[in-house]
Image: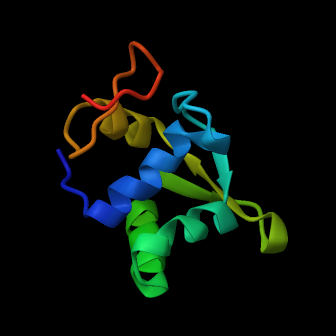
Amino acid sequence: MQVLTETEELLLAVFHEKRRDRVGATPGQTVAARQLLDVGERFPPDDVEVALAALVDRKLVVPEGEGEGQGYAITQQGVDYLYSGAGVGAFSRADNEGEVE
């Protein structure tokens, strides 16, 4: 199993909490690039961009669209990682309420 940085895991968690609703992530679900970059308030902006590029390189997310409409879609691999328990803050797929295990 891949080991992600805290920043990479935080970016993946955005797919779980889209629009601040803990809806759970599904393959193909997209999040606007701006929303992902805004998450980086806890981290320097360069760290967030590097983390996002790493998620793409690892095929956990894929870029979608261009320009203002650019976003990222989570892949099946990304969903599997998010709910596998491998990450520091692994989410439970069963309850989709976003309770951290």
So how many labels did they put on this image? 0
- Looking at the image, which residue is at 48% across and 78% down? 49
Question: Residue 32 vs residue 27: left or right?
Answer: right
Quarter holding the C terminus is top left
Quarter holding the N terminus is top left
Q: Quadrant of residue 21?
A: top right
Question: Residue 90 vs residue 86: left or right?
Answer: right
Residue 14 to residue 6: above or below: above
Q: Position of residue 97 (x, y in %)?
A: 47, 22
Residue 83 to residue 40: above or below: above
Q: Position of residue 51 (x, y in %)?
A: 39, 71
Q: Position of residue 22 (x, y in %)?
A: 54, 31
Question: Residue 41 vs residue 30: left or right?
Answer: left
Q: Position of residue 91 (x, y in %)?
A: 34, 31
Residue 67 to residue 71: above or below: below
Color style of the picture: rainbow
Q: Farthest residue in the top direction?
A: 94
Residue 53 in view (yes/no): no
- Looking at the image, which residue is at 49% across and 83% down? 45
Q: Farthest residue in the right direction?
A: 68
Residue 39 in view (yes/no): yes
Q: Quadrant of residue 3?
A: bottom left
Residue 29 to residue 11: above or below: above
- Looking at the image, which residue is at 76% across and 61% down? 65
- Looking at the image, which residue is at 57% across and 62% down? 36
